[in-house]
Image (cartoon, rainbow, N blue to C red):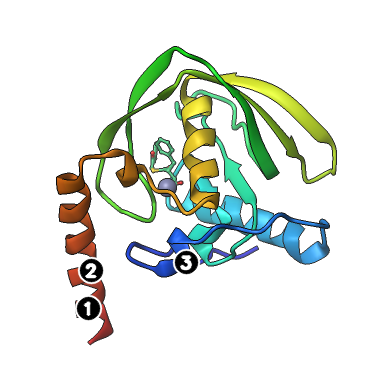
């Protein structure tokens, strides 16, 4: 297993549309293990493959946040959100590709998602609360969409400029 480098905005790979996974090879199963290790190390509650530079439809998450909660690792391959509830929920989201920046985002409270598990089972399940928020955040990553795309243009431009400056300093 290995910890991968997480890409930060304005890396162009974070704005690309990812490709469906056609087969679960040994390399892809290894990637899933590495994504879990990278997510737990960060730490975070989710991670999408493009955040580690792989433009494929793979996400991992573990929304068991409390110390006394049992870990609940979930990997989804080719996830598709089939249904969104009308009720919404607002949560202060963060993103490992935009470190130390948090803002409220309102999304559907409940969803139904279909995906392939690493064991190649086709799974359909409903999710609510933090898990539903996290799945939507991660599925957005696969479409090149970031949580800052839900914010006002002013807020989005401000945070993007900050990270553009940091990237320029690092490239020197
Ligand atoms: O996809 C990512 O960038 C990971 C992101 C997932 C996420 C957070 C909040 C709402 C929806 C999706 C994170 O994990 S940011 C870090 C974070 O939220 C966290 C870190 C440590 C403990 C608890 C939460
Ligand atoms: Zn994110």
- The secondary element bearing badge 3 is classed as helix
**Position of the N terminus by quadrant:** bottom right
Residue 169 rendering spot, x and y as whole percentages: 19, 78
Q: Which residue is mark 1?
A: 168
Residue 162 rendering spot, x and y as whole percentages: 17, 61
Q: Quadrant of residue 135?
A: top right
Distance between mark 1 and mark 2 Cα atoms: 6 Å
Residue drawn at x 27%, y 83% is: 171
Q: Which residue is mark 3?
A: 13
Relative height, residue 109 to residue 169 (above, below)? above
Tag 2 near tag 3, CB within 8 Å = no
- The secondary element bearing badge 1 is classed as helix
**Position of the C terminus by quadrant:** bottom left
Residue 54 rendering spot, x and y as whole percentages: 59, 65
Residue 57 rendering spot, x and y as whole percentages: 64, 52
Relative height, residue 142 to residue 130 (above, below)? below
Residue drawn at x 48%, y 19% is: 129
Relative height, residue 38 to residue 108 (above, below)? below
Residue drawn at x 18%, y 71% is: 165
- The secondary element bearing badge 2 is classed as helix
Can the viewer see residue 155? Answer: yes
Q: Which one is in front in this view, the residue at disc 3 or the one at disc 1?
A: 3
Residue 11 as seen in the image, left or right of residue 69: left
Tag 1 near tag 2, CB within 8 Å = yes
Distance between mark 3 and mark 1 Cα atoms: 17 Å
For marks 2 and 3 on the same chain, the one whose residue lies earlier in the sequence: 3
């Amino acid at each position: 297993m290995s910890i991968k480098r997480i890409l930060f905005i304005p890396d162009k790979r974070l704005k690309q549309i990812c490709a469906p996974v056609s087969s679960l090879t040994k390399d892809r199963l290894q990637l899933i293990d590495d994504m879990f290790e990278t997510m737990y190390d960060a730490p975070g509650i989710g991670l999408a493959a493009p955040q580690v530079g792989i433009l494929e439809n793979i996400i991992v998450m573990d929304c068991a946040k409390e110390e006394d909660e049992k870990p609940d690792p979930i990997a989804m391959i080719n996830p598709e959100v089939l249904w969104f509830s009308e009720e919404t929920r607002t949560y202060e989201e963060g993103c490992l590709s935009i470190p130390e920046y948090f803002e409220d985002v309102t999304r559907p409270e409940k969803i139904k998602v279909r995906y392939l598990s690493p064991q190649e089972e086709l799974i359909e399940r409903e999710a609510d609360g933090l898990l539903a928020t996290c799945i939507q955040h991660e599925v957005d990553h696969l479409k090149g969409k970031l949580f800052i795309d839900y914010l006002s243009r002013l807020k989005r431009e401000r945070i993007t400029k900050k990270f553009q400056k940091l990237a320029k300093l690092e490239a020197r």
